[in-house]
Image: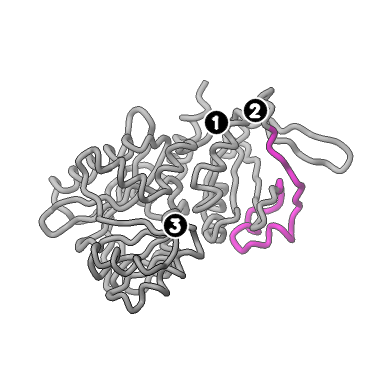
Amino acid sequence: MKKNILVLFGGRSPEYSVSLQSAYAVLTHMNKEKYNAVTVGIDPKGNWHLFTGAYDAIPDDTWRTKGPCVPVVLPMDQEGTHCLLTAEEDWQMIPIDAAFPVMHGAYGEDGRLQGALEMAGIPVIGCGMTASALCMDKRLAHQIVSLYGIHTARSVCISCYDRNTASLAERIGYPLYVKPLRAGSSYGIRRIVSDHDLQEAVKNALQYDDTVLLEEEIIGEECGCAILGTEDLFSGVPDRIVLESAYYDYAEKYAPVTSKILCPSGYEDAMVQKIIDTAKTIYRALGCAGFARVDLFVREDGELVFNEVNTIPGFTAHSRYPQMMQKAGISFEQLLDRLIEERTAS
């Protein structure tokens, strides 16, 4: 019998459009002989809709108008693992074997959705509530990882711009980065070289979160490592980002002009193994499960510095995480199979 996999996409995050691309890739590469995709789109207002139309309507965001869409809700009664379909005249239960949140940023990757699914008794493909929340909070993630002897950037948190902000920034030292504490895809991030631009940068970051991080600039190259599994961990082939600009911003991530990604990274074998071992340590330290991408900086002296963990990284066939797994011998279809089977195996 086919397993019903709830695939969730969209959401209230600024990364809504990125989620549509990832979900389309997942849905079109999922093994249709083994799994039945129960496709639920969450619109920017947070409403849930069972979408039974053509997948082609998802990436261009016409799924809501082309339909068909029916409102659904998630029951918390724990009497069964199911979604509740709201029909015009009756309620229809849809059994669910596992949920795959293909959502990025707030309300999808930060633990809130994972917590709701866990309360409903539905197994979550990927990181659970606690790990998702920890990884989204840059301050907490850095504090925990530093306890394992892994270097992190010096930083300080603020909730507004006031007369103390400039002095805090001076302690960090310029240039520095102003970041929303909990956001993804480089939203709200600015690199500043003096206090002249500090107030505007903080104001911009506060559009995405109510807490802002002032963070030391790390001089070095950025690399990533895809990790798969929960108990026994498998690593993809680490990649390396080659930049001409100061940092890897939103535009470069999704429409690269001056940057390129090398996979394999080109590092010597000893450094590659060091990246993999460090990524696995971070993954375990933060309680990750299923899959995640660990991002690090490589300084010129070979020291690794932790940047962040993406618990739901970009998930198109051409995204960094699937590409790292592809280089390690796992196709996109096989990757999805392994992720689903880990959470649905009886």
Give how far across and how far down residue 220 sits, in percent: 20, 61
Label 2 secondary element: loop
Question: Which contiguous range is marked in magenta?
Answer: 49-75
Depth check, front residue: 247 or 138: 138
Classed neighbour count for the residue bearing mark 2: other residues with Cα under 10 Å, few (<14), some (14–19), many (≥20): many
Give how far across and how far down residue 327 sits, in percent: 31, 48
Q: CA distance from mark 1 to mark 3?
A: 31 Å
Q: Residue at x 69, y 27 (%)?
A: 77
Seen in the picture, residue 73 relative to 218 is either above or below; the reply is above
What type is the residue that disc 3 sits on? Thr
Q: Please report whichever mark, 1 or 3, sits nearer to the chain's N-terminal start.
A: 1
Residue 211: give its label.
3
Question: Which of the 4 image quarters holds residue 280?
Answer: top left
Which residue lies under the disc numbered 1?
123
What type is the residue that disc 2 sits on? Thr
Q: Please report whichever mark, 2 or 1, sits nearer to the chain's N-terminal start.
A: 2
Camera-near label (1 vs 3) is: 3
Q: CA distance from mark 2 to mark 1?
A: 9 Å
Camera-near label (2 vs 3) is: 3
What type is the residue that disc 1 sits on? Pro
Q: Residue furthest front?
A: 163
Q: Is residue 145 magenta?
A: no
Residue 81: give its label.
2
Mark 2 in CB contact with mark 1 (< 8 angstroms):
yes
Seen in the picture, residue 142 relative to 250 is either above or below; the reply is above
Give how far across and how far down residue 324 sits, in percent: 33, 49
Q: Residue at x 40, y 71 (%)?
A: 201
Label 1 secondary element: loop
